Amino acid sequence: MSAEPFSSIEGRPEGRQTSELVAGYLAALSIAFSLIALAWHPIRLLGPSMLLALVSAGMVGRGRRLQLAAVLISAVCFFLAMMITVITGRALW
């Protein structure tokens, strides 16, 4: 029996940091909220969705595509949700 560890805590898989992983999950959650907001209560979901997208983009800095996609998708979904709401006469809340 040896007392050597099975794995080392120092190295992360693929060189990712914890903040990058959390930012990825926040961006994915933002995209999901944005797409759901097109069909159900736009103001309730798009506000937090935009906030999540901006926080995730701020956590990782420049050069990450998922966070950029989350910001752009939430902006486009905001425009589309407001247009759908005005055309159909649905309530915002």
Image (spheres, grey):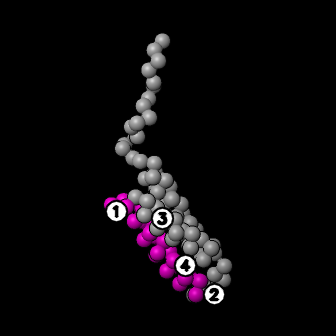
Is residue 29 in the magenta section?
no
- Magenta residues, start to end: 61-86
Secondary structure category for the residue under label 4: helix
Name the N-terminal-most of marks 1 and 4. Answer: 1
Amino acid, disc 2? Gly
Q: Nearer the viewer, mark 3 or mark 4?
A: 3
The dominant secondary structure in magenta is: helix
Q: Is the residue 44 above or below the residue 22 in the image?
A: below
Q: What residue sits right under mark 1 in the picture? A: 62
Occupied quadrant, residue 42: bottom right
Q: Nearer the viewer, residue 53 or 34?
A: 53
Amino acid, disc 3? Val
Q: What residue sits right under mark 3 in the picture? A: 55
* Left or right, 93 with reference to 75: right
Q: What residue sits right under mark 2 in the picture? A: 89
Q: Label 1: few (<14), some or many (≥20) within 10 Å?
A: few
- Viewport quadrant of the C terminus: bottom right
Residue positioned 44% across, 35% down in the render? 9
Q: Is the residue 21 above or below the residue 29 in the image?
A: above
Q: Dots 3 and 2: beta carbons under 8 Å?
A: no
Q: Which mark is residue 71?
A: none
Amino acid, disc 4? Ala
Farthest residue, direction top: 1
Q: Which mark is residue 81?
A: 4
Q: Label 2: few (<14), some or many (≥20) within 10 Å?
A: few
Query: How far apart are the alpha carbons under marks 1 and 2?
Result: 39 Å
Secondary structure category for the residue under label 1: loop
Name the N-terminal-most of marks 3 and 4. Answer: 3
**Place of residue 79 in the rendered image (x, y in percent of width and height, measured from the top left):** 49, 80
